[in-house]
Image (cartoon, rainbow, N blue to C red):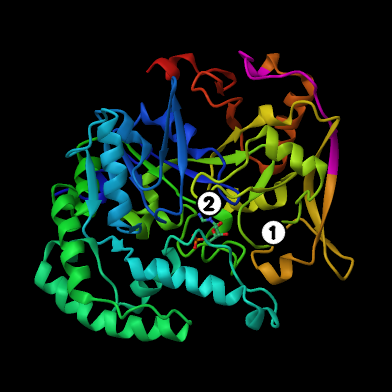
């Protein structure tokens, strides 16, 4: 048996988005994978999407950590994740079709909760109701979810009596008995939301989901012991956050957040590994800001500049294809995420998108409706809606920078922009991403040649 005090505490790394998601975590996780043995997802579900470019091949993954693209890494879907088995199996099949090995190298926690089809129906029905004319009279309260059933699945986890866990899929009779009760309740709840489909059929669902369980059986594990055993054996773990810190259910812009702890604070509960085991936290930050779905966004540019960022950055959702809202970098928000996540460094992504702007703005404070100012973030949608950003304006640069070989060869203005980010956040920008390719990355100031060929 292994215990925490035998762990090498500096060996483990966490990667987390510092904004509202889509910071380009996939590429950074991919770069760090070569230095780690086990890659772990601790939160969220198929609402997340990350894209990894390997040579000419582009992979879009939603549930499986991108470490799967390396044959020799163990990838773990932790207990804090909500798993849609149908989507997961599709992802496994798609990877295998492209020659990627998915066998015992993929472990799925038996305690991860299952996203069922009725969760997706509930998610969509609630969003429809909240954006309907009736509810509009009270203001539009729709969250703009991905409709992947995330909120309803986590709600069942908290409610306990109506939840299904991955381990339950392996016991068909137990699954069937639970679904009989759940389906009766859920049919009534869906009807209350105005969904009048045929009553949910517990036997059909039980048969289908037990089949999914059978296919997933070789991967299902007690991931908590598996992770502690790996740490005890000296393996290095990389914790991969999904969604992002400002979408954290407790610390994000509530209620316009997702339903999990996406900040690094979700790691202990979502994996069973104590926070003290993590030595390095790399926060991923876009050189500007984006947001998908509803919710406050103080630095949003609902104009030509925003449009230009969207087109240069190809800011359209990996999961839903929705155009992302774009705006200037909000360092009040990023500094707050650095604090909450305990980030020890930043990876600044998509810096190349900012080439060609005459001037670039950085938000360094907020003006409140009563005229006072603050440099503290406000993790509450209603209160954050009322703030006006206070900007510092910096000169932009015209050169394309994708092929820069060194931080010192970037235009002076780009170097100053990075230096200002370091000053305000108080942590070093350890990685700068200048394009989708592994080679278009500066690590500790220099082009990531070694990592790219690793
Ligand atoms: P849900 O996670 O589908 O419930 O969506 C809740 C909110 O989080 C919505 O505004 C989504 O657009 C947003 N969201 C969830 N996951 C991601 C992500 O991976 N990137 C960006 N936004 C996300």
Residue depth check, mark 2 versus mark 1: number of the one nearer the observer: 2
Residue in front for this viewpoint, 350 or 214: 214
- Precedes in sequence: disc 2 or disc 1: 2
Vertical comparison of 48 with 36: above or below: below
Mark 1 crowd level (few <14, some 14–19, many ≥20, 10 Å Cα): some
Q: In the displayed structure, does residue 391 sit left or right of residue 317? A: right
Q: How crowded is mark 2: few (under 14 residues within 10 Å), some or many (20 or more)?
A: many
C-alpha gap between disc 2 and disc 1: 15 Å
Q: What stretch is highlighted in magenta?
A: 392-407
Is 176 drawn above or below residue 147 in the view shown?
Answer: below
- Residue 235 in view, yes or no: no
Picture quadrant where residue 209 is located: bottom left
Residue 244's disc is 2
In terms of depth relative to the viewer, which is nearer, 11 or 447?
A: 447
Position of the C terminus by quadrant: top left
Q: Does the magenta stretch include residue 80?
A: no
Examine the image and state in which quarter residue 285 appears: top right
Residue beneath disc 1: 377
Secondary element under disc 2, as helix, strand or loop, is: loop
Percent position (x, y) of residue 223? Answer: 23, 52
Asked if the beta carbon under badge 2 is closer than 8 A to the nearest atom of ligand 1, the reply is yes
């Amino acid at each position: 048996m292994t215990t925490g005090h035998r762990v090498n505490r500096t060996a483990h790394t966490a990667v987390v988005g510092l904004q509202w998601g889509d910071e380009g975590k996939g590429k950074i996780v991919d770069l760090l994978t070569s230095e780690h043995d086990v890659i772990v997802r601790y939160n969220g579900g198929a609402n997340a999407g990350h894209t990894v470019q390997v040579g000419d091949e582009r992979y879009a993954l939603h549930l499986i950590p991108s470490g799967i693209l390396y044959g020799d890494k163990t990838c773990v879907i932790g207990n804090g994740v909500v798993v849609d088995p149908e989507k997961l199996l599709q992802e496994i099949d798609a990877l295998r079709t492209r020659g990627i090995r998915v066998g015992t190298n993929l472990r799925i926690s038996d305690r991860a909760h299952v996203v069922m089809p009725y969760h997706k129906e509930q998610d969509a029905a609630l969003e429809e109701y909240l954006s309907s004319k009736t509810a509009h009279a009270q203001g539009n309260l729709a969250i703009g979810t991905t409709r992947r059933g995330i909120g309803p699945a986590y709600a069942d986890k908290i409610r306990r009596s109506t939840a299904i866990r991955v381990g339950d899929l392996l016991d068909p009779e137990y699954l069937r008995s639970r679904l009989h009760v759940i389906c009766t309740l859920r049919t009534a709840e869906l009807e209350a939301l105005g969904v009048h489909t045929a009553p949910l059929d517990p036997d059909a669902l039980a048969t289908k989901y037990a089949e999914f369980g059978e296919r997933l059986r070789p991967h299902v594990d007690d991931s908590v012991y598996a992770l502690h055993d790996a740490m005890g054996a000296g393996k290095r773990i990389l914790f991969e956050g999904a969604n992002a810190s400002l979408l954290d259910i407790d610390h994000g812009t509530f209620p316009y957040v997702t339903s999990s702890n996406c900040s690094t604070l979700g790691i202990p509960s979502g994996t069973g590994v104590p926070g003290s085991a993590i030595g390095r936290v790399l926060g991923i930050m876009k050189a500007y800001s984006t947001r998908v779905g509803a919710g406050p966004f103080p630095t949003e540019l609902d104009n030509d500049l925003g449009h230009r960022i969207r087109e240069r950055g190809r800011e359209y959702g990996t999961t839903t294809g929705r155009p992302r809202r774009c705006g200037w970098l909000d360092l009040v928000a990023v500094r707050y995420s650095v604090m909450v996540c305990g980030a020890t460094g930043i990876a600044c992504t998509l810096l190349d998108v900012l080439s060609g702007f005459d001037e670039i703005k950085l938000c360094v404070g907020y003006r409140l409706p009563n005229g006072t100012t603050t440099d503290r973030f406000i993790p509450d949608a209603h209160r954050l809606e009322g703030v006006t950003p206070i900007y510092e304006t910096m000169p932009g640069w015209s050169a394309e920078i994708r092929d820069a070989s060194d931080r010192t060869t970037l235009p002076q203005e780009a170097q100053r922009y990075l230096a200002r980010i370091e000053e305000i956040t108080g942590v070093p920008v350890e990685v700068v991403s200048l394009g989708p390719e592994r080679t278009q990355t500066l690590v500790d100031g220099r082009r990531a040649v070694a990592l790219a060929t690793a």
